[in-house]
Image (cartoon, grey):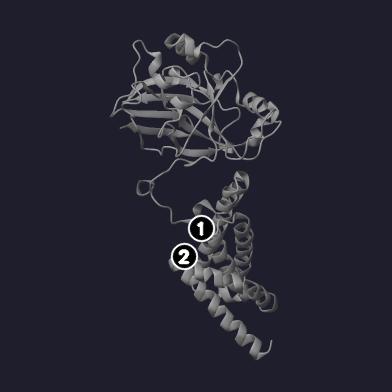
């Protein structure tokens, strides 16, 4: 390599690292636009220099990948760049240059590698490729250190803003179907064994430890429903019940909050199920490999510490497999689709007299193996 070429490469390296630093410090769009124009040159230098230059290429790709997920919203480009960065960071770790560095410098490089893997996972989730996102997350070792205590963070719903309405099952536990019919035969009597499907609008899912708006003046009959929610990990069309497990990314707890007066006052349930704050979800999304299929999990709810619902998800009338087979026979369910599988007996309208929620009440919905979703009515 001649001296002029080496000097040019060194200047280019300094410029790339300076611009990358500018972006990381302040998310400078101008810095990333310049980095975009320099990308082809970085690749050329990387092809013609020693393995140590893999670190410069990785840093360049890393910064551009961050830009494409944060500002440019181009997940495909982000995946390509972050994958390349992860590959080159891994190569660079084996170089003589890195072996000669301090422990702190090597630790920083390892953190950069994990960050590119995290970018890949996030970009795949932007495209609703949930299984690919999980694969990238699993590349990051659990013992990486630097964990933040749960008490120091704020948990959001596992899917805070679902891209589509939640698909819901009505009266999918026999005892709940019976208590519903007792409350309002006109609204809840089933004329056949066919599953009852409805959808639930969610502008933003309620977070664990969050609130349920009382909506005073709009409803006087605020109710709770503890449910197992299924989240799909890939597009589903013409799925057979026997193959349903292959499409499930994971499970979470969902409280199908309902305004019973609005629900029964309309021929459709949509309005009474879809008010703001009516879909608390969490506390976590447990991946499907952690729960035996089909799920046979205890499900309970408590209001102000009093047990209200207690059942098992094995008692679903229409199983998860049957739900997927029936729905996908005529429609495509996209990755990220949330299916709320129904609630057992013990909801407020099932008591005589009914016991609806009031301001200040605390509702806890718990499913074995997933956790407790706690919400307070305000």
Left or right: residue 368 versus residue 52 is: left
Residue identified by numbered label 1 = 70
Q: Nearer the viewer, residue 342 or 55?
A: 342
Q: Secondary structure at mark 1?
A: helix
Place of residue 251 in the rendered image (x, y in percent of width and height, measured from the top left): 53, 34
Q: Quadrant of the N terminus?
A: bottom right
Q: Nearer the viewer, residue 214 or 157?
A: 214
* Callouts 1 and 2 close, C-beta under 8 Å: yes
Q: Toward which corner of the image does residue 288 lie, by quadrant?
A: top right
Left or right: residue 239 versus residue 21 is: right
User: Residue at horizontal 60%, vertical 72%?
Assistant: 37
Task: Give the spatial CA distance, label 1 vs label 2.
Answer: 9 Å
**Residue 105, can we see it?**
no
View extreme (bottom): residue: 3
Q: Quadrant of the C terminus?
A: top left
**Residue 77, can we see it?**
yes
User: Residue at horizontal 36%, vertical 37%?
Assistant: 209
Does 311 appear above or below 9?
Answer: above
Q: Which mark is residue 27?
A: 2
């Amino acid at each position: 390599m001649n001296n002029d070429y080496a000097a040019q490469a060194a200047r280019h390296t300094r410029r790339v690292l300076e611009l990358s630093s500018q972006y990381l410090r302040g998310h400078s769009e101008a810095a990333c636009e310049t980095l975009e124009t320099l990308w082809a040159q970085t690749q050329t230098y990387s092809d013609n220099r020693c393995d140590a230059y893999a670190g410069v290429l990785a840093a360049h790709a890393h910064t551009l990948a961050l830009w494409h997920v944060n500002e440019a919203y181009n997940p495909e480009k982000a995946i390509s760049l972050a994958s390349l960065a992860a590959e080159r960071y891994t190569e660079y770790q084996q170089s003589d240059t890195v072996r000669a560095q301090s422990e702190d410098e090597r630790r920083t490089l390892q953190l950069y590698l994990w960050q590119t893997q995290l970018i890949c996972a996030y970009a795949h989730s932007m495209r609703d490729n949930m299984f690919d996102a999980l694969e990238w997350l699993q590349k990051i070792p659990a013992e990486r250190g630097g964990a933040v205590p749960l008490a120091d963070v704020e948990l959001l719903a596992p899917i805070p803003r679902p891209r589509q309405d939640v698909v819901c099952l009505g009266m999918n536990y026999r005892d709940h179907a019976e208590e519903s019919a007792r409350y309002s035969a006109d609204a809840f009597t089933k004329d056949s064994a066919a599953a009852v499907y409805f959808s639930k609008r969610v502008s933003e899912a309620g977070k664990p430890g969050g609130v349920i708006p009382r909506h005073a003046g709009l409803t006087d009959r605020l109710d709770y429903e503890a449910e197992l929610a299924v989240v799909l990990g890939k597009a589903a069309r013409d799925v057979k019940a026997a193959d349903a497990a292959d499409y499930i990314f994971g499970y979470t707890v969902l409280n199908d909050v309902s305004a019973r007066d609005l629900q029964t006052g309309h021929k459709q349930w949509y309005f009474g199920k879809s008010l703001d704050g009516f879909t608390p979800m969490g506390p976590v999304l447990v991946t499907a490999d952690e729960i035996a299929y089909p799920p046979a999990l205890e499900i309970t709810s408590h209001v102000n510490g009093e047990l209200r619902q207690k059942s098992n998800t094995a008692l679903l009338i229409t199983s998860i497999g049957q739900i997927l087979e029936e729905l996908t026979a005529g429609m495509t369910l996209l990755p990220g689709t949330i299916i709320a599988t129904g609630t057992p007996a013990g909801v407020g309208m099932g008591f005589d007299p009914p016991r609806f929620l009031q301001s200040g009440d605390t509702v806890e919905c718990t499913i074995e193996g997933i956790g407790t979703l706690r919400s307070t009515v305000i």
